[in-house]
Amino acid sequence: MNTPYRFKSRDTGDVVMLHHTGKRVLEILGKDPSGPGIILADQIPAAAAALHAAIEQEEAEQKRQKEEAQANGDPPPEFEVVSLRMRCAPLFEMMERCRQAGVEIVWGV
């Protein structure tokens, strides 16, 4: 089933992600995407750091692929128009507000 993920907190509006993006984000965070879950306020900095690291890794890999294609005279590879960085921007904002307020983020509830 491709139900969107809805991230909620007591301090912010909801952040909704399409199923494939939400699942990927939860896997990056080491969370089980198959059911409800929680990121406690004290876990938010590590969660944000894990997402930032994944984004940097993805961008470095895309840059490497573009440079390799250019060096080989091949057409540049195509990637998703909306990057993981852009898709995660609302979640980063939610994380920062929740960290400051000391509240958790939940999904699937």
Image: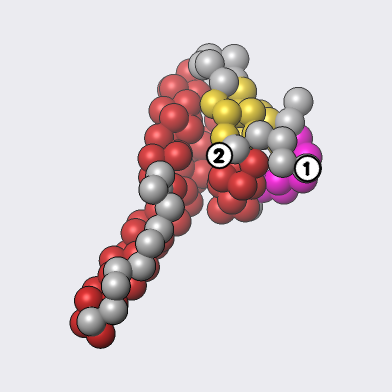
* Magenta range: 31-36
Look at the magenta stretch and give its main secondary structure: loop
Residue 15, percent across and down? 54, 26
Relative to 73, is 95 above or below?
above
Relative to 91, is 47 above or below?
below
Relative to 60, is 51 above or below?
above
Identify residue type, mark 2: Gln
Q: Which residue is drawn at 57% across and 21% down?
A: 14
**1 or 2: tag closer to the N-terminus:** 1
Q: Residue at x 36, y 67 (%)?
A: 77
Residue 109, percent across and down? 76, 25
Element class at badge 2: helix
Q: Residue at x 40, y 35 (%)?
A: 89
Q: Quadrant of residue 22?
A: top right
Looking at the picture, tell me which residue is in the foreground, 45 or 17: 17
Residue 19, percent across and down? 64, 41
Residue to which mark 2 is pinned: 43
Identify residue type, mark 1: Met
Relative to 87, is 74 above or below?
below
What whole-number distance in Å separates the C-alpha atoms at marks 1 and 2? 28 Å
Element class at badge 1: loop
Q: Left or right: 37 with respect to 17?
A: right
Whether residue 8 is visible: yes
Residue to which mark 1 is pinned: 1
Q: Residue furthest bottom?
A: 72
Single out the mark in the foreground, 1 or 2.
Answer: 1
Whether residue 52 is visible: no
> Which numbered tag is attached to residue 59?
none
Quadrant where the N terminus lies? top right
Residue 33 covered by magenta stretch: yes
